[in-house]
Image (tube, grey):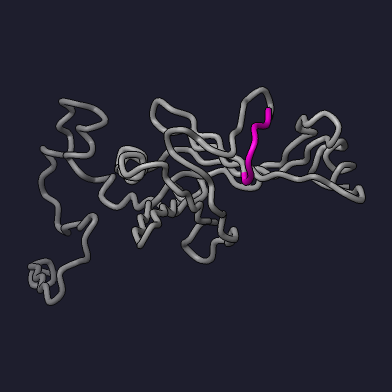
Amino acid sequence: MTALTPALDTALSGDRALIFGSVEINLPGYDLRLLDGSGVLQVDGQAFFGEDTIYGVLESIDELTDGLGDESPALSINLLPASEASAGQLSSPTFQGSRVRVRVGAVDRLTGISIGDYLLFDGEIDVPVLTVGQRRRALALECVSSFERFFDNDEGARLSDSYHQSIWPGETGFANITGIEQTIYWGVANPSGTVKTGLRGIFQ
């Protein structure tokens, strides 16, 4: 028993399975859907192309790596942009965080229709890396899993008047606290060498 659909499992276990890889990137205002080869393929009612007229073609996909420690699963999607303008757009900070999905599937040789697909990766664009050389322009989209958001650092999100009022505007409970004996530092390390004295022991 596998995680694949019965139809896809049967197709992949055949003698001459015709497989495909696809990448879908949901950019702001545009859905980029690319195949790992030439042609057009309908997958779940959506058309995937070997070449996108605006953003170019898919060159390769690096090996998916498992996350270790405080890192989430990641991969690199390598594109050959159609123009300098499209390369610049894909490198724009506004595209960072766009959803990325990578699938593999099989195609019926007789009909040319997708039999099914399996989701390998579901994440987002992290960092674009543009490489320009002689007669070559390539863009590597470093992508991370959606689990990356679990590693967001929330230091400073509590016991802070500014953060408290960002959630409840005008509520100044933290601004009016007095009589705190110990300073609690948020988002920064405690200052070293601080000396604190008290009079409690003298009068007891």
Look at the image and tell me in which quarter the C terminus lies.
Answer: bottom left
The quarter holding residue 84 reads: top left
Q: Is residue 99 above or below residue 179?
A: above
Q: Position of residue 29 (x, y in %)?
A: 40, 25
The residue shown at (41%, 52%) is 139
Is residue 104 covered in magenta?
Answer: no
Q: Position of residue 70 (x, y in %)?
A: 46, 62
32 relative position to 5: left or right? left
For the magenta stretch, what is the residue range? 36-42
Q: Position of residue 32 (x, y in %)?
A: 50, 34
The quarter holding residue 116 reads: top right
Q: Residue furthest bottom?
A: 193
Q: Position of residue 19 (x, y in %)?
A: 76, 45
The residue shown at (63%, 41%) is 38
In depth, the one of 176 and 125 nearer the eye is 125
In depth, the one of 20 and 173 nearer the eye is 20
In depth, the one of 176 and 139 nearer the eye is 139
Q: How many marks?
A: 0
Q: Residue furthest top?
A: 45
In depth, the one of 202 and 145 nearer the eye is 145
Q: Is residue 19 above or below residue 189?
A: above
The quarter holding residue 164 reads: top left
The residue shown at (78%, 37%) is 107
The residue shown at (23%, 55%) is 186
23 relative position to 187: left or right? right
65 relative position to 117: left or right? left
Is residue 41 covered in magenta?
Answer: yes
Q: Is residue 193 above or below residue 138?
A: below
